[in-house]
């Protein structure tokens, strides 16, 4: 049976088919639907954690228990989960462990545009990158095989266009995986210096083995066509390349860390111009340059900002663009606004009238920064309002503190605001904190991802689908 | 050959159901289909766009400037915003409904006048008061199905296929209402 599936839905399908038993995540666009969809399968235990660090640690624990386990997060979520994941790279896994990180080039719903491939490189973790829903399903399975074969967490990188596009996916049966017996092995699982020193040796051996694997895996493939231009690309960019230059030769990379060398060099030797097409940073391009492989075009053509598209590739390579007519008057923008009747609205109207200094946070209430409320002075990352209010008022004193508030939502408070409050108490702060408790994670589509109330992901999903 | 359709509107107008319905019709016709939409922030009353592409083999999930065969627009300002995505010879099917965006509400900008006339000079345009037809069908919420009806007349797919997809996509208790909305759109 074939079904039209969202990329995220297909990741969940991949989890089901791969025999995954445990999912713990914290919501974040564009990764959220994976966990909601995984919760619909009775065979998978799925839950929301209070933040990405706890989610990752829970998944590591489930892996230790012998289960194929998983967690999903948006790109900035990896910043929060990085601590356990960098060391889980050393301890390795028992049951396969796959971590999905969803990038957001173009910042459709994010505060920055960080490129998560750097994390895979820095943490020495294998990373696969699907380009559509069918590959989302297939690459989840491939990631579990890599994870267990190379004794490592494996990372699945998606982006907004992959996560939120739909294409037809053939459904397969579940490949049930028995729990792998847990055997006590402190040398492996206790990351104390004496053990970790030895584990680092294993990590480097593993990277060597993965580099060899990268030369032959079917995750990377060559499509030879016209040899005037050869594209090296991955993920959604592969689809833009095929749309713009259907006849050209393409090396499509599905394993984006580690990258092959010989395979790319062989491909480069067969084409006249070698063009690297990747969104955000020049990770593939730098790899080629470092390994002495000629690059005839890359970041010099495409830049580092936002999403690419078929037209951007056409323009960069001097191909003709489809003709079009633009409306010749300025069209007023239509920025998102808080819903009518949103409880945050009244608060921000008051904050705006009182002209307070508002150290904001991330959630629907970030919209209080836009016109006509214009009520927010700063927004950094989840939980930052409280820490910033502390530092700000410590420096400017009581008079300023009377006109300053930190504003944070309930899910964000549970995520990473609490430790900020502990700090306020310990360091005798004079800051004021407003917790906007609407009993929901509004921003990402109303998950009950707050441990202080409400049903878990599984119950929610059954309620809402 | 790939055919590209864009569905544009304002967050909360029901564009997602329209794209789902369209996707179901196209799959039943045996096409390769890709759908792409951005979830998240924009759904809070922002400008939203969904791409629907079909053919023997579809690569890119997005539609770029000058590539759309059809633009199905739920709001007239959005038609002006996205018209550059229409290919030469493409068709714009637009609702005449106006929803003021924040810069107009706050008085920072004015809602442009005469958009339909201007657009009609630029391209093949059919403007329909879909809200009126939806209300006639029984609910203002059926604007999306009215507009699908408008689009259906332009596409080479039998009416039964559309009705079947509506049956599969909308809840049973709203089926008659939606069928009526579809027909009103198709005859508009
Ligand atoms: C580290 C990190 N994880 C996830 C997100 C995505 N995200 C943005 S705001 C938010 C939670 C908002 O919930 P809440 O604080 O309760 O505010 P509400 O939207 O309900 O007003 C989430 C999950 C993020 N920006 N950063
Ligand atoms: S989703 Fe909820 S919290 Fe967010 S703007 Fe709407 S009402 Fe407010």
Image (cartoon, rainbow, N blue to C red):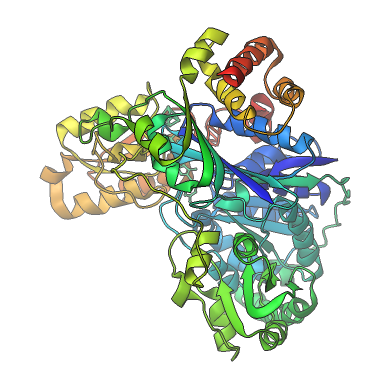
Residue at image location 63% in from the left, 85% down from the top = A272
Residue A247: tell me if it is visible.
yes
Q: In x, y percent, where is residue A153?
A: 69, 63
A244 with respect to A320 (left or right): right
B96 with respect to B35 (left or right): left
User: Above or below — where is A89 with respect to A163?
Assistant: below
User: Above or below — where is A266 with respect to A412?
Assistant: below
Between residue A415 and residue A234, name the one nearer to us: A234
Q: Quadrant of the N terminus of chain A?
A: top right
Q: Quadrant of the C terminus of chain A?
A: top right
How many discs mark residues in the rendered view? 0
Residue A203: tell me if it is visible.
no
Query: Which quadrant holds residue B101?
Result: top left
Between residue A442 and residue B63, name the one nearer to us: B63
Residue at image location 47% in from the left, 17% down from the top = B131
Q: Pick out the residue farthest to the left.
A: A399
Residue at image location 77% in from the left, 66% down from the top = A146
Q: In x, y percent, where is residue B53?
A: 64, 45
Q: In x, y percent, where is residue A62?
A: 73, 51
Between residue A337 and residue A452, name the one nearer to us: A337
Q: Quadrant of ligand 2?
A: top left
A72 with respect to A77 (left or right): right
Query: Which quadrant holds residue A45?
Result: top right
Q: In x, y percent, where is residue B133?
A: 52, 14
Residue at image location 28% in from the left, 30% down from the top = B113
User: Above or below — where is A368 with respect to A416?
Assistant: above
């Amino acid at each position: 049976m074939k079904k039209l599936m969202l990329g995220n839905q297909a990741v969940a399908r991949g989890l089901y088919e791969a025999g995954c038993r445990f999912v713990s995540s914290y919501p974040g666009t564009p990764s959220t639907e994976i966990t909601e969809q995984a919760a619909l399968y009775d065979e998978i235990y799925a839950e929301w954690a209070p933040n990405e660090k706890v989610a990752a640690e829970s998944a590591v624990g489930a892996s230790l228990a012998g289960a194929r386990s998983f967690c999903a997060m948006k790109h900035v979520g990896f910043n929060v989960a990085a601590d356990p994941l960098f060391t889980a790279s050393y301890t390795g896994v028992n049951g396969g462990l796959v971590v999905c990180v969803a990038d957001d080039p173009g910042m459709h719903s994010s505060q920055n545009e960080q490129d998560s491939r750097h994390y895979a490189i820095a943490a020495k973790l294998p990373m696969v990158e699907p380009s559509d829903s069918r590959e989302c399903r297939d690459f989840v399975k491939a990631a579990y095989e890599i994870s267990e074969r190379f004794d490592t967490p494996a990372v699945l990188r998606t982006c907004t266009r992959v996560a939120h596009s739909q294409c037809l996916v053939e459904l397969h049966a579940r490949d049930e995986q028995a729990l792998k017996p847990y055997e006590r092995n402190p040398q492996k699982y206790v990351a104390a210096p004496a053990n970790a020193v030895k584990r680092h040796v294993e990590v480097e051996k593993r990277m060597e083995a993965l580099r060899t694997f990268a030369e032959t895996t079917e995750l990377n493939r060559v499509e030879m066509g016209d040899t005037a231009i050869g594209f090296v690309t991955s993920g959604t960019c592969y689809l833009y390349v095929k749309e713009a230059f259907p006849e050209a030769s393409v090396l499509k990379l599905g394993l984006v860390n580690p990258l092959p060398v010989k395979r790319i060099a062989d491909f480069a030797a067969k084409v006249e111009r070698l063009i690297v097409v990747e969104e955000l940073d020049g990770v593939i391009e730098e790899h080629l340059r470092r390994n002495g492989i000629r690059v005839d075009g890359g970041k010099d053509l495409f830049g580092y900002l936002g999403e690419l598209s078929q037209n951007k590739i056409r323009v960069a390579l001097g191909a003709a663009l489809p003709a079009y007519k633009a409306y010749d008057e300025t069209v007023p923008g239509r920025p998102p606004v808080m819903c009518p009747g949103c409880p945050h609205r009244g608060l921000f109207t008051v904050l705006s009238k009182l002209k307070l200094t508002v150290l904001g946070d991330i959630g629907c209430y970030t919209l209080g920064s836009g016109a006509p409320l214009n009520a927010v002075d700063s927004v950094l990352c989840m939980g930052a309002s409280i820490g910033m209010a502390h530092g700000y008022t410590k420096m400017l004193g009581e008079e300023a503190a009377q006109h300053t508030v930190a504003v944070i939502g309930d899910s964000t408070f549970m995520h990473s605001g609490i430790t900020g409050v502990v700090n306020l108490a310990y360091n005798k702060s004079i800051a004021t904190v407003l917790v906007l408790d609407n009993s929901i994670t509004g921003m990402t589509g109303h998950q009950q991802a707050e441990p202080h109330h409400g049903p878990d992901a599984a119950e929610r999903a059954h309620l809402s689908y | 050959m790939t055919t590209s359709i864009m569905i544009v509107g304002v967050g909360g107008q029901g564009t997602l159901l329209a794209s789902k319905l369209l996707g179901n019709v196209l799959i039943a016709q045996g096409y390769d289909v890709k759908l792409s939409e951005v979830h998240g922030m924009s759904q809070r009353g922002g400008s939203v766009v969904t791409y629907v592409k079909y053919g023997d083999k579809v690569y890119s999930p997005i539609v770029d400037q000058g590539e759309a065969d059809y633009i199905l627009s739920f709001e007239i300002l959005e038609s002006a915003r996205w018209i550059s995505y229409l290919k030469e010879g493409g068709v714009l099917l637009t609702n005449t409904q106006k929803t003021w965006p924040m810069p107009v509400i706050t008085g920072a900008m004015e809602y442009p006048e005469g958009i339909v006339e201007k657009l009609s000079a630029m391209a093949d345009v059919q403007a329909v008061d879909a809200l009126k037809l939806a209300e006639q069908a029984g609910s203002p919420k059926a604007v999306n199905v009215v507009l699908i009806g408008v689009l259906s007349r332009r596409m080479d797919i039998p009416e039964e296929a559309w009705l079947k997809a509506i049956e599969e996509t909308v809840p049973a208790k709203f089926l008659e209402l939606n069928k009526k909305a579809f027909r009103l759109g198709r005859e508009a």
